[in-house]
Image: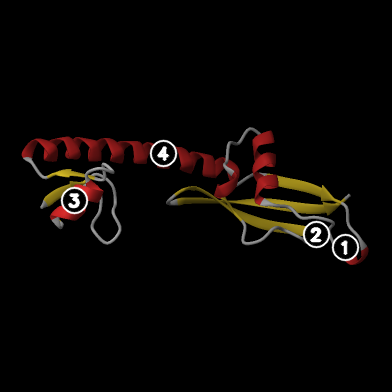
């Protein structure tokens, strides 16, 4: 059965592609989950319009993310934490702390967009990446000082 994919489906194809799949796979999985539609002429036109709208929306989101990236490149966040012997931090600076500090400065960034391998547990200056869009990543400076 030939279907037109409405979303990217792993190991099948990308959004908007016309693919040939097993009848049962299409009937029992792709069509009920609205991941695909039957490949008719009218459906091809509808899916093409959806694809164009998706591309316009994606381009708008990317341009907004690039503008925010320029603003975030100048941001410096300072955290004051208690320290013990040998300048060892009590606690750490997490992605949530960074997202909350950005929110306090009127930058709306989700916690999961802050890319930290592990929480910051040392004093000093650190560079943290923030993924604003699939193709746009910004770097912010985080300074951890003793209280």
One can see residue 80 in this view: yes
Q: CA distance from mark 4 to mark 2?
A: 35 Å
Q: Are marks 1 and 2 in contact (CB under 8 Å)?
A: yes
Q: Is residue 12 left or right of residue 101?
A: left
Labels 1, 3: front one: 3
Q: How far is disc 1 from disc 2 in space, using C-alphas?
A: 7 Å
Whether label 4 touches label 2, CB < 8 Å: no
Image point (76%, 60%), residue name: 121
Q: Earlier in the sequence, mark 1 or mark 3?
A: 3
Which residue is identified by label 2?
123
Q: Position of residue 146 (x, y in %)?
A: 87, 53
C-alpha span from label 3 to label 2: 56 Å
Q: CA distance from mark 1 to mark 3?
A: 61 Å
Depth check, mark 3 against mark 4: the one in front is 3
Residue for badge 1:
87
To which residue does mark 3 refer?
A: 26
Mark 1–mark 4 CB contact (< 8 Å): no
Q: Nearer the viewer, residue 55 or 20?
A: 20
Which residue is drawn at the image coordinates 6% and 39% (left, top)?
A: 41
Q: CA distance from mark 3 to mark 4?
A: 32 Å
> Depth check: 20 or 62 in front?
20
Q: Could one spot residue 19 in this view of the protein?
A: no
Residue 63 pos. (x, y %): 42, 40
- Under tag 3, what secondary structure? helix
Disc on res. 113: none
Q: Is residue 100 above or below residue 119?
A: above
Instruction: Report the residue marked by disc 4.
Output: 61
Q: Earlier in the sequence, mark 3 or mark 2?
A: 3
């Amino acid at each position: 059965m030939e279907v037109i994919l409405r979303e990217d489906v792993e190991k099948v194809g990308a959004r908007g592609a016309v693919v040939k799949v097993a009848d049962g796979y299409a009937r029992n999985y792709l069509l009920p989950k609205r991941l695909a539609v039957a490949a008719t002429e009218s459906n091809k036109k509808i899916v093409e319009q959806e694809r164009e709208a998706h591309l316009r929306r994606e381009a708008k989101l990317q341009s907004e993310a690039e503008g925010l990236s320029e603003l975030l490149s100048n941001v410096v966040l300072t955290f004051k934490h208690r320290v013990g012997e040998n300048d060892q931090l009590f606690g750490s600076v997490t992605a949530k702390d960074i997202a909350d500090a950005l929110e306090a400065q009127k930058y709306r960034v989700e916690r999961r967009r802050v890319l930290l391998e592990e929480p910051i547990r040392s004093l000093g200056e650190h560079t943290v990446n923030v993924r604003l869009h699939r193709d746009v990543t910004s770097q912010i400076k985080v300074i951890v000082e003793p209280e």
